[in-house]
């Protein structure tokens, strides 16, 4: 199923629809002073998406986000820095209402094997200041609204990590 665009109806909860708790992440890494964000390709969708997906029974938000990040963009060395937002909308096939808890994660990993290549055929690192087309408008809005917060938290964590690395050498 290829969707051409998302309109306001994706953000209106239908009566009686099943709610699916979900988790995902904005995964950042530093490269040459720039903040890059990991974005996934999702089968059947135009543009990029943030890695996210449903939580398994008994799974906490952070564990689910780690699993989804590994499945969709192949990154396994990620560290949660902060909570970002909870977004709600219909999922891509309109079968359930997703309540997605997004966290901010830092990594030094450039790539890894995507855990679900059939549904997520690729990933890309994109500059936080020059975002490509994203399929979900609310994900773009999240990145734009939280851009300065993301920049500050990531740069502070990266500086602290760099300082610790210099101290241990």
Image (cartoon, rainbow, N blue to C red):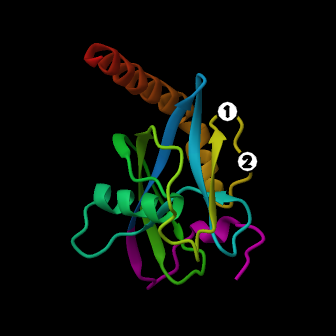
State the image quarter where residue 34 is shown. Answer: top right
Label 1 neighbour load within 10 Å: few <14, some 14-19, many 20+:
some
Q: Which SS does the magenta portion mostly show?
A: loop
Quickly name the residue at label 1: 129
Instruction: Assess whether residue 2 is covered by the magenta stretch.
Output: yes
Q: Which residues are magenta?
A: 1-21
- Reading the image, the residue beneath label 2 is 132
The reply, left or right, for residue 143 in relation to residue 4 is left
- Residue at 39% from the left image edge and 20% from the top image edge: 162
Q: 15 or 140: nearer the eye?
A: 140
* 136 inside magenta stretch: no
The kind of secondary structure element at disc 1 is loop
Q: Nearer the viewer, residue 10 or 49?
A: 49
Q: Quadrant of the C terminus?
A: top left
Q: Is residue 167 above or below residue 33?
A: above
- Outermost residue toward the right in this view: 4
Towards the viewer: 112 or 5? 112
Please identify the quadrant where the N terminus is shown: bottom right
For the point 45% across and 37% down, the residue is 108
Marks 1 and 2 in Cβ contact (< 8 Å):
no
Give the residue displayed 61% in from the left and 24% down from the top.
32
Where is 125 relative to 157, above or below?
Answer: below
Judge left or right: residue 95 versus residue 135: left
Percent of width and height locating residue 54? 40, 71
The x and y percentages for residue 25 are 45, 51
User: Seen in the image, is 38 located left or right of residue 43?
Assistant: left
**Classed neighbour count for the residue bearing mark 2: other residues with Cα under 10 Å, few (<14), some (14–19), many (≥20):** some
């Amino acid at each position: 199923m290829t969707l051409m665009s998302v309109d306001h109806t994706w953000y209106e909860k239908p009566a009686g629809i099943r709610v699916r708790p979900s988790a995902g992440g904005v995964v950042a890494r530093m490269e040459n002073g720039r903040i890059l964000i990991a974005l996934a390709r999702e089968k059947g969708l135009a543009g990029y998406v943030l890695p996210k997906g449903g939580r398994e029974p008994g799974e906490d938000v952070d564990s689910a986000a780690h699993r989804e990040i590994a499945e969709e963009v192949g990154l396994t060395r990620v560290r949660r820095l902060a909570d970002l937002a909870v977004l709600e909308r219909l999922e891509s096939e309109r079968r359930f209402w997703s309540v997605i808890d997004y966290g901010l994660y830092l990594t030094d990993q450039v790539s890894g094997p995507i855990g679900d290549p059939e549904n997520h055929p690729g990933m890309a690192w994109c500059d936080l200041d020059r975002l490509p087309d994203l399929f979900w408008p609310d994900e773009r809005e999240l990145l734009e609204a939280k851009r300065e917060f993301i920049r500050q938290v990531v740069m502070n964590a990266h500086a602290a990590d760099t300082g610790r690395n210099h101290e241990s050498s």
